[in-house]
C-alpha cells in the first residue's frame, strides 16, 4: 500500500489527527470541546505529521521541541514524540514505520541529538532504535504509619495556588529550578497548555501546592483525590500525586511533609518517583512506603550518536572502544574510543559492539553494559571491557524525567 506522509498544519487536519489518535488508543476520553483555533496552540507548528492512504488520513504522529540533560549536566536538543496512532482498520501495513522513519529523518535534519517517548506497549519501539533509558516508580504511602525520623529537616513553606494562578507559576518554577539529573527534559509551552486543558475539563477536584517563598518557589506538587464515590465514609481516602517536582532537598521535605500531613488522607500515591528517591529512608517505619509498580519511563532514540557520546560526561579509569550499529540512520554507525576525558570517533578495533537501541538504554546510566550484554543487546570481546564501560558510564543520580506526555 502506498502511503503519503505530510505535515499537518490546518486546524481541520490537526483536529482530525487528534481524533484519529484517540480512536487508535481505544480507551482514551474524547477530545474536550475546543475553542476555534485552540488545537493549533496545543501542538507545535510543523511537527504533526499525517499518513494518507488513498487520500484518507489513516495515521499520525507528532513531536515537541525540547531539551534533555545528559550525565554530567550537558543539555542537548531533544524531540519529545507523542500521539503515534494508526486507525485500527489500517494497522500492520507499515504505516507507523513510515511515520517513525519520517520523524527520524526530520529530527536529524533539525540537528536534534535525541528523541524520547512514552510507550503504550513495550514491544513497538525497539525496532526503530529506541531503548528504555529511565524508569519510574509508583509509591504508595500509608500516612498513619509514615512518621519521619527525628532530625529529618522541615523543608520550607508550602502553600496552595488557585487553579488560574497555577498555570502561570508552574512553568516558571520548573524552568527556574531545572534539575541536573540525567533524563530531565524541558516542558514545552504546548504541554502546559494541554495539561491546563485536561485539568480544567476533568470533572473532579485537583490541587496545586508550591514550595518556597512567593516569587522564588523551588518545587510543586499537583494532586487530586481518587475513588471519591464514598469519600465521606471511606477508610482509604487517597490522593494521587500526579506531578511531584521536588528538585532540592528542602522542596522534597517541605512538599512531603505537606502531603503526608493532609487531614483526612489515609494514603498518598506518588505516581512517578525516581528509582533513587530517598522517601523510605526518611521514615521510621520504611514499610509505610510501598513500591506499587516500576514502569519503563523514557524510551530514548539517539538521533546523533557522535554528539550524544561527546556531550555526556564519563568517570573512572580505563578506556573502551565501542562500535555502534544503526541501520535506520546510517551516519550513526561508527566506533568511539571512550575515557574519562570524553568520547571520540576512532578506527581502532572495537571491544564492544552495540546496536543504537542498546546504546540508548545505557546512555543516561539507567542500565549497565553487563546487563545489556546479558540481554544480548551488546557483545564484548572480553568481559573486562564491560566492567570498564560500566565504570565510565556510571551516574550519581538515577535518570528520571518525572513527566508523562
Ligand atoms: C502501535 C501502532 C501505532 C502500530 O502501527 P502499525 O501501522 O500497525 O505498525 P507497522 O505496520 O508499521 O508495524 C511495524 C512492526 O511493528 C510491529 N508492531 C506494531 N504494533 C505492534 C504492537 N502493538 N505490538 C507488537 N508489535 C507491533 C508490527 O508487527 C511490525 O512488525 P514487523 O516489522 O516485524 O512486521 C498501532 O498499532 C496503533 O495505533 N496502536 C494503538 C495506539 C498506540 O498504542 N500508539 C502508541 C502510543 S505510544
Image: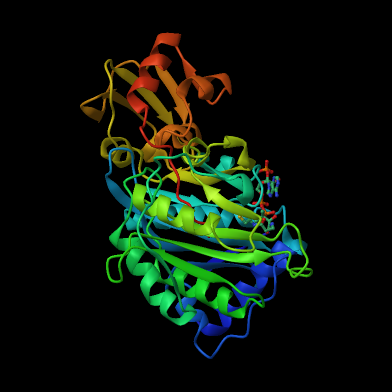
| Res 8 seen here | no
**Which residue is at a point 60% across and 73% down the rendered structure image?**
17
**Hey, which residue is sitting farthest left in the picture?**
341
Instruction: State left or right for residue 299 relative to residue 394.
Output: right
The answer to which of 229 and 304 lies nearer the viewer is 229
| Res 128 seen here | yes
The answer to which of 192 and 158 lies nearer the viewer is 158
Labels in figure, total? 0
Q: Is residue 357 above or below residue 226?
A: above
**Which residue is at a point 28% across and 25% down the rendered structure image?**
315
Residue 342 appears in which quarter of the rendering?
top left
Q: Is residue 141 above or below residue 404?
A: above
**Which residue is at a point 75% across and 64% down the rendered structure image?**
26
x%, y% of residue 80?
45, 57
x%, y% of residue 312?
29, 37
Instruction: State left or right for residue 21 relative to residue 14.
Output: right
x%, y% of residue 87?
71, 65
Q: Is residue 242 above or below residue 44?
A: above
Instruction: State left or right for residue 285 relative to residue 389.
Output: right
Specify the quadrant that holds the N terminus. Answer: bottom right
Q: Is residue 331 above or below residue 385?
A: below
In this figure, which colouring scheme has been used for the structure? Answer: rainbow
Amino acid at each position: 500500500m502506498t502511503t503519503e506522509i505530510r505535515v499537518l498544519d490546518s486546524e481541520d487536519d490537526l483536529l482530525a489527527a487528534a481524533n484519529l489518535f484517540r480512536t487508535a488508543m481505544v480507551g482514551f476520553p474524547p477530545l474536550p470541546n475546543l475553542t476555534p483555533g485552540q488545537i493549533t496552540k496545543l501542538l507545535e507548528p510543523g511537527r504533526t505529521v499525517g499518513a494518507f492512504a488513498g487520500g484518507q488520513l489513516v495515521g499520525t504522529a507528532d513531536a515537541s521541541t525540547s531539551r534533555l540533560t545528559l550525565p554530567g549536566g550537558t543539555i542537548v536538543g531533544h524531540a519529545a514524540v507523542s500521539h503515534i496512532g494508526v486507525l485500527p482498520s489500517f494497522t500492520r501495513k507499515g504505516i507507523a514505520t513510515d511515520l517513525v522513519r519520517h520523524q527520524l529523518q526530520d529530527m536529524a535534519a533539525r540537528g536534534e541529538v535525541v528523541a524520547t517517548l512514552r510507550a503504550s506497549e513495550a514491544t513497538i519501539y525497539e525496532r526503530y532504535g529506541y531503548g528504555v533509558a529511565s524508569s519510574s516508580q509508583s509509591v504508595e504511602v500509608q500516612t498513619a504509619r509514615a512518621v519521619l525520623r527525628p532530625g529529618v529537616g522541615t523543608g520550607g513553606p508550602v502553600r496552595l495556588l488557585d487553579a488560574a494562578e497555577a498555570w502561570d507559576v508552574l512553568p516558571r518554577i520548573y524552568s527556574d529550578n531545572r534539575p541536573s539529573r540525567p533524563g530531565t527534559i524541558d516542558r514545552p509551552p504546548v504541554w502546559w497548555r494541554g495539561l491546563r486543558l485536561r485539568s480544567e475539563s476533568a470533572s473532579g477536584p485537583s490541587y496545586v501546592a508550591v514550595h518556597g517563598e512567593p516569587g522564588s518557589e523551588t518545587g510543586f506538587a499537583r494532586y487530586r483525590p481518587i475513588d471519591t464515590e464514598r469519600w465521606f465514609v471511606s477508610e482509604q481516602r487517597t490522593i494521587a500525586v500526579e506531578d511531584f517536582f521536588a528538585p532540592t532537598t528542602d522542596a522534597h521535605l517541605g512538599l512531603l511533609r505537606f502531603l503526608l500531613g493532609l487531614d483526612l488522607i489515609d494514603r498518598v500515591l506518588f505516581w512517578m518517583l525516581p528509582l533513587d528517591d530517598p522517601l523510605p529512608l526518611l521514615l521510621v517505619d520504611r514499610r509505610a512506603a510501598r513500591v506499587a509498580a516500576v514502569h519503563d519511563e523514557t524510551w530514548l532514540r539517539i538521533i546523533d550518536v557522535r554528539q550524544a557520546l561527546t556531550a555526556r560526561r564519563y568517570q573512572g579509569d580505563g578506556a573502551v572502544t565501542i562500535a555502534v550499529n544503526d541501520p535506520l540512520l546510517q551516519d550513526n554507525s561508527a566506533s568511539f574510543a571512550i575515557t574519562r576525558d570524553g568520547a571520540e570517533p576512532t578506527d581502532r578495533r572495537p571491544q564492544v559492539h552495540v546496536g543504537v537501541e542498546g546504546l540508548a538504554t545505557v546512555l543516561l546510566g539507567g542500565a549497565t553494559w553487563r546487563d545489556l550484554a546479558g540481554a544480548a543487546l551488546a557483545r564484548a570481546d572480553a568481559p573486562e571491557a564491560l566492567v570498564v564501560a560500566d565504570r565510565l558510564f556510571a551516574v550519581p543520580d538515577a535518570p528520571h524525567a518525572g513527566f508523562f506526555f
